[in-house]
Image (cartoon, rainbow, N blue to C red):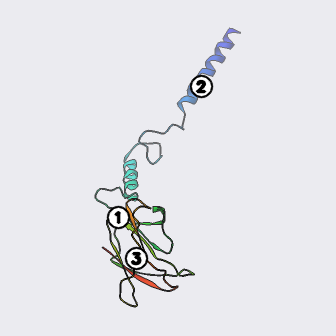
């Protein structure tokens, strides 16, 4: 009887040690890509994360938006490596609308009327809605099909 109890206790102890040793839920420190190894592939994964996030050394991330709705967060903007020197935007919405342009705060936007060739009046620049960015807007609403030529400097 003693032998059976001792054997049973030894078996239970062995099972608990084996299940502890095979705990696959604990992540391996440094295993960025989740393949169960820490190797060169993890370094490549880190470099890709940095590149996709705009974190590579010497690379500036610019944010760009142009549309008929005022942006309220950077999720509405595109990440770009540079701004277009000049772009024409046409109001293709179903109603007269202001045109909104978002850039990084170190840029200046000038809007021109492509039909008249003159400057388009603008609202005061919004520098508070999205930190680090400026939001430019036409002063008046453009008609459906109306457009502006945008220059960024």
Residue at x-position 56% and y-position 28%: 18
Give the mark toward the camera: 3 or 1.
Answer: 3
Label 2 to label 3, Cα distance in Å? Answer: 72 Å
Q: Position of residue 134 (x, y in %)?
A: 39, 66
Spot the residue most to the bottom. Answer: 115
Q: Secondary structure at mark 1?
A: loop
Q: Secondary structure at mark 3?
A: loop
Cβ–Cβ below 8 Å for labels 1 and 2? Answer: no
| Residue highlighted by disc 2 | 16
Tag 3: Cα neighbours inside 10 Å, few (<14), some, or many (≥20)?
A: some
Q: Position of residue 112 (x, y in %)?
A: 37, 83
Q: Quadrant of the C terminus?
A: bottom left
Foreground: 26 or 133? 133
The circle on residue 122 is 3
Foreground: 86 or 136? 136
N-term mark: 3 or 1: 1
N-term mark: 2 or 3: 2
Spot the residue most to the right. Answer: 1
Image-quadrant location for residue 130: bottom left
| Residue highlighted by disc 1 | 105
* Residue 74 versus residue 21 in the image, above or below: below
The circle on residue 79 is none
Cβ–Cβ below 8 Å for labels 2 and 3? Answer: no
Q: Secondary structure at mark 2?
A: helix
N-term mark: 1 or 2: 2
* Residue 142 versus residue 153 in the image, above or below: below
Task: Report the number of discs.
Answer: 3
Q: Position of residue 33 (x, y in %)?
A: 45, 48
Residue at x-position 54% and y-position 38%: 25
Label 3 to label 1, Cα distance in Å? Answer: 16 Å
Cβ–Cβ below 8 Å for labels 3 and 1? Answer: no
């Amino acid at each position: 009887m003693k032998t059976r109890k001792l054997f049973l206790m030894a078996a239970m102890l062995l099972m608990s040690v084996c299940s502890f040793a095979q705990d696959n839920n604990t992540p391996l420190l440094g295993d960025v890509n989740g393949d169960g190894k820490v190797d060169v592939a993890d370094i490549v994964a880190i470099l890709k994360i940095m590149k996709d996030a705009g974190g590579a050394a010497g690379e500036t991330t610019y944010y760009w938006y142009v549309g008929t709705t005022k942006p309220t967060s950077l999720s509405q903007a595109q990440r770009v490596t540079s701004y277009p020197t000049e772009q024409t935007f046409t109001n293709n919405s179903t109603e007269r609308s202001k045109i909104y342009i978002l850039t990084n705060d170190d840029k200046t936007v000038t809007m021109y009327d492509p039909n008249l060739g003159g400057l388009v009046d603008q609202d005061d620049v919004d520098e508070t809605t999205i930190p680090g960015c400026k939001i430019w807007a036409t002063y008046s609403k453009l008609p459906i099909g109306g457009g502006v030529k945008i220059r960024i400097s």
